[in-house]
Amino acid sequence: MMQKFDEMYTKLPYEFFTHGAQIRDHYKIYDEWLARQPGNMMAKRREEAEMIFRRVGITFAVYGEKDEDGAGTERLIPFDLIPRIIPANEWRSMELGLTQRVTALNRFLHDIYHDQEILKAGLIPREQIEQNAQFRPQMMGIDLPNNVYSQISGIDIVRAPDAKGNGEYYVLEDNLRVPSGVSYMLEDRKMMMRLFPDLFSAHRVAPIAHYPDLLLETLRQSSPATTAEPTVVVLTPGMYNSAYFEHAFLAQQMGVELVEGQDLFVKDNFCYMRTTRGPQRVDVIYRRVDDDFLDPKVFRPGSTLGCAGLLDVYKAGHINICNGVGTGVADDKSIYPYVPKMIEFYLGEKPILNNVPTYMCRNKDELSYVIANMKDLVVKEVHGAGGYGMLVGPAATKAEVEDFKKAVLANPSGYIAQPTLSLSSCPTFVESGIAPRHIDLRPYVLSGKTVQMVPGGLTRVALKEGSLVVNSSQGGGTKDTWILEDDAAAVARVELAAAAEAAAAEEADRIEPAAPKAQSQTQS
């Protein structure tokens, strides 16, 4: 029988009111608090949270679904009131592993667009890179600031029991193109602090509200060396994009302009945005638009979401696009199995965070195993995302498995497979009460001159009983993620904040105040 691991309880099924006997140490204060609450409190707080989220407009669009008027469906992402709590020592190890992994991935991206040493060493087959749909030959030889391609990385972490039943963290997926969800991380924390202020008095929860400051700092550090005071913008496909709330939210939180492709133009090898005070030069674009739509002169000719000539400005070193063009080749699921080798090749280190064991269907022996055992495996399209293009064998019907076998046999290189992990569960407030639901975690790793991140990330929860699919597009919800600080972490945070404040003051003394920024014509 497959072992199970719960984040709060030491064994399943839950046995309530055991006076803490089955509660993990870092959840005991929360458990005592929960036991003191009246029976209808959680339901009332959930209604309050939904009302506030709806009023603020924290929604996402579901593509392909229509309401009764034929318009696209806007949904609230379900928010669960029970936090996912991680002790300081576990986070420290995870943080080291994330820093190591993202550093290696950026080294890999720089390498494949320059000397291709890892291909010459034979560690990755050349055709897997050069025939990959996400590989951009236009990027060959282009030098980027700090040699960083993925300034914002969303790394999906899962936990599963080892042979002894202890929870071990694994990397399930790397998201290096336009990782989303960080606005929900921030809004979930604000909501929890609003609904349960007493819980934050009882726990030393590491803060995350400074994420927009870190993001802006990272983007400014990623500017070309053509200006001391870079202008940063957020490029959105527009209000009909599923993550538009997040685009507007992050621009507002950073105090920068939210622009669409029509607001930008290229002149004399520089990029400008149209403003009510005339053109203003742009130095860094935090793009939430896929590669194919960035420049109609180079990629998709009919695109109106990008800016014609943008890639020429990029190649000239007069603008930086974050994340870089061509980063998708490193987060392709067919490249994921090679990340441990990248860590050893570029850093000379063993991976701190392990991959989930992966079968590459492009290899004949592994394909045979996958076909023979598909009912027990999770099979994924290498370009799939959002929970689409995958089969969870144990949850699929015989007909679904047979259909998927045909698809894999028709295009083996388009698929990978992994064992069906027993993902860790966390108590979740559902209609029937408090019950275990499977979760993952997406920390957001920022890479500028250094690698930094806020403690924790976005915990996603599969609300359907037994489901392993946490994606919001598939009905998943979110939880607040608490990293509990110990004394060492608290002291380090205070020292870091003081150093940052001193550096900011020194910078302010050095640079004269800049003129007020012009407003974009497209914004009210």
Image: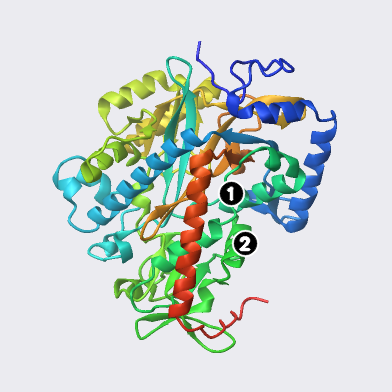
Marks 2 and 1, how far apart at CA: 19 Å
- Tell me, yes or no, if residue 201 can be seen here: yes
**Residue at image x 50%, y 10%?**
1
Answer yes or no: is residue 287 visible: no
- Residue sitting at 69 percent across and 51 percent down? 73
| Residue 392 locus on image (x, y percent) | 50, 27
Secondary structure of the residue carrying tag 1 is loop
- Which numbered tag is attached to residue 67? none
Q: Callout 2, which amino acid?
A: Phe
Q: Mark 2 Cα within 10 Å, few/some/many (few <14, many 20+)?
A: some
Residue 124 appears at what percent x and percent y?
22, 41
Q: Earlier in the sequence, mark 2 or mark 1?
A: 1
> Which residue is nearer to you in this view: 292 or 141?
141
Q: Which amino acid type is marked by label 1?
A: Pro
Q: Quarter holding the C terminus?
A: bottom right
Q: Is residue 382 above or below residue 294?
A: above
Task: Answer left or right for 504 relative to 70.
Answer: left
In the displayed structure, would residue 352 be above or below residue 454?
Answer: above
Q: In this view of the protein, which residue sits in the foreground, 7 or 35?
A: 35
| Residue 364 in the image: above or below residue 220 | above
Residue for point 54% across, 56% down: 211
Q: Position of residue 301 (x, y in %)?
A: 41, 69
Q: Would residue 309 appear left or right of 316 to someone viewing this image? A: right
- What numbered label is drawn on residue 249? 2
The image shows residue 47 at horizontal and vertical percentages of 81, 42
Tell me the element at label 2: helix
- Specify the label residue 207 is tagged with: 1
How many other residues sit within 10 Å of disc 1, few (<14), some (14-19) or many (≥20)?
some
The quadrant in which residue 141 appears is bottom left
